[in-house]
Image (cartoon, grey):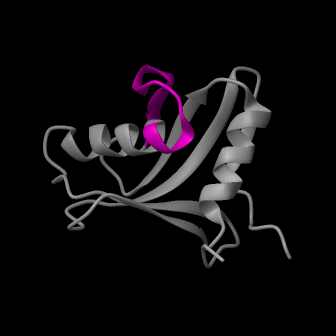
Amino acid sequence: MSQPPKCYRLSPGGLSLFVRVTPNGGRDAIEGVETRDDGTAVLRVRVSAVPDKGKANAAVVASLARALGVPKSAVSVVSGETARMKTLDVAGDGAALIEKLTALALPPP
């Protein structure tokens, strides 16, 4: 079984996560890792919230916090506030976060 491409970078306080958000997507879901045309990997996240006044960003933060088992305060948008491509910082134990993220990124058996 091959490893999915890495959509994160380990940092001293946790990890930086690269995501592609689909706002107004009808449901909240983490759809796995996508390899972009330039070779970079992003985690695809779909949220039902509209991209208005930070509602979609708040929904992304809530979905990822729930999926990774961390409080919402541990997840923050550090770049791409108004773009689909975002970088989020997730505070916590980097190794444990990577383990949970890998489980999310793999398709179900």
Position of 6 relative to 25 (above/below):
above
Position of 43 relative to 71 (above/below):
below
Counting the numbered discs, the total is 0
Measuring from the top left, give residue 66's x and y in whole percent: 44, 39
Q: Where does the N terminus fall, quadrant-wise?
A: bottom right
Q: Where does the C terminus fall, quadrant-wise?
A: bottom right
Residue lying at 43% horizontally and 20% vertically, measured from the top left: 73
Q: In the rendered view, does 24 fall on the left or right side of 99?
A: left
Residue lying at 67% horizontally and 65% vertically, measured from the top left: 40
Evaluate whether residue 15 shows in this view. Answer: yes
Measuring from the top left, give residue 86's x and y in whole percent: 46, 48
Choose between 15 and 28: the one closer to the eye.
Answer: 28
Residue lying at 66% horizontally and 67% vertically, measured from the top left: 106
Displayed quadrant of residue 34: bottom right
Evaluate whether residue 7 shows in this view. Answer: no
Q: Verify whether residue 71 appears in magenta.
A: yes
Q: In the rendered view, does 62 fall on the left or right side of 13?
A: left
Choose between 29 and 50: the one closer to the eye.
Answer: 29
Residue lying at 67% horizontally and 34% vertically, measured from the top left: 15
Q: In the rendered view, does 40 fall on the left or right side of 27?
A: right
Displayed quadrant of residue 32: bottom right
Choose between 15 and 31: the one closer to the eye.
Answer: 31
Q: In the rendered view, does 40 fall on the left or right side of 50?
A: right
Displayed quadrant of residue 58: top left
Residue extent of the magenta highlight: 66-79
Measuring from the top left, give residue 16's x and y in whole percent: 63, 38
Q: Verify whether residue 68 appears in magenta.
A: yes
Q: Outermost residue, right direction?
A: 1
Measuring from the top left, give residue 49's x and y in whole percent: 19, 52
